[in-house]
Image (tube, helix red, strand yellow):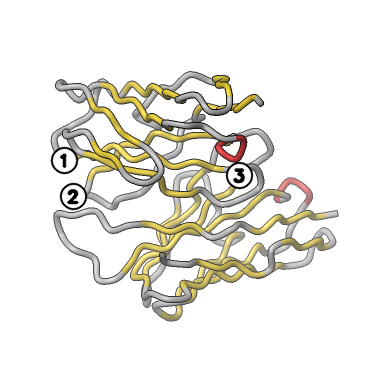
Amino acid sequence: DAKTTQPTSMDCAEGRAANLPCNHSTISGNEYVYWYRQIHSQGPQYIIHGLKNNETNEMASLIITEDRKSSTLILPHATLRDTAVYYCIVIDIQGAQKLVFGQGTRLTINP
Amino acid sequence: GAVVSQHPSWVICKSGTSVKIECRSLDFQATTMFWYRQFPKQSLMLMATSNEGSKATYEQGVEKDKFLINHASLTLSTLTVTSAHPEDSSFYICSARAFPGTSGSYDEQYFGPGTRLTVT
C-alpha cells in the first residue's frame, strides 16, 4: 500500500503557483520523498526528490517539513501543459526501491 | 536524459492469443526493470520486478504463468501476456533502473511511454 495521502484533485490558474500537498506521517529515516507526474496516456515523469532539505530544480520546488511528515510540491508558474496526475512516493533506498503509486492528485491548470 | 522505449505503443489482439511487449533502455544499462499495469482512471499497479539474468519477482495476485517476463540483457525486458482475455486490456508501463546499482543510494528509475493493449 502507498504510504502517502494526497488530495484527489486540485485546480490552479495558469501562471499562478500550484502547491500540491502530500502527507507521509509514517516516513522512516531511510525513505526519500519522490514526486512523479503522469500526463494522460503517457508514462510517469520524474519531477524532484528530497530527504529532509528543501530542493529546487528547473521543474519545481519541494518543501519538506522539519518532522518530515509532510511535503509540498510547488510549480512556480503553472502552464496548461502541467495538467497531469501528480504522485508523491516515499522510497526506502535500502530496500528494493519499488515505486508504489497511490491515487495521486489530478491537477488541472485552467486558462 | 535517460530514455526508455516500449514496443509496440499499442496493440489489438484477439482473445486467446499471446502478446509480447518489449521494454528497452536506449542509452543506459538497467540491472532492474519494473512492469506496471494501469486501468482507466486508476493508478499504476506494480506487477513484477525483473532482474537481468534471473527470474522475475511477481507482486501478490499477479499470475506469473500468465504474465511471462524475460530480462535477457541489461537493455531489454519483455512482458508476454499469454492467452489474453478482454480483462487483460490495460495500459502496460515499464521502468528501468540504471546500472550500476549503488547500495545506500537511490538509483533513478526511468519510465517508458506505455503500451496500450486491447483484447477483443
Tell me: B106 left or right of B46.
left
- Position in image of residue B63 (x %, y %): 55, 53
Question: Which corner quadrant of the image does residue B7 belong to?
Answer: bottom right
Q: Which residue is mark 3?
A: B38
Q: Residue at horizontal 76%, vertical 63%?
A: B11
Residue A72: percent from the left, percent from the top?
A: 34, 25
Which residue lies at the image location 69% right of the left edge and 38% below the top edge?
B40
Does residue A85 sit above or below B79 in this rendering?
Answer: above
The chain containing the residue under callout 3 comes to B
Residue type at mark 3 is Gln
User: Which numbered dot is residue A14?
Assistant: none
The amino acid beneath tag 1 is Asn
Q: Residues within 10 Å of mark 3 (few under 14, many from 20)?
A: some
Q: Nearer the viewer, residue B57 or B37?
A: B37
Q: Are marks 1 and 2 in contact (CB under 8 Å)?
A: yes
Nearest the eye: A78 or A4: A78
The residue wearing badge 2 is A94
Image spot of residue B8 (x, y percent): 69, 68
- Mark closest to the chain's N terminus, 1 or 2: 1
The answer for which chain carries disc 2 is A
Residue at the disc numbered 1: A30
Same-chain check, marks 2 and 3: no
Mark 1 to mark 2: distance in Å?
7 Å
Do labels 3 and 1 touch, CB within 8 Å?
no
Name the element at disc 1: loop
Q: Quadrant of the N terminus of chain B?
A: bottom left
**Residue under the image location 30 percent in, 50 percent down:** A97
Q: Badge 2 local density, few (<14 within 10 Å), some, or many (20+)?
A: few
How many marks the image carries: the answer is 3
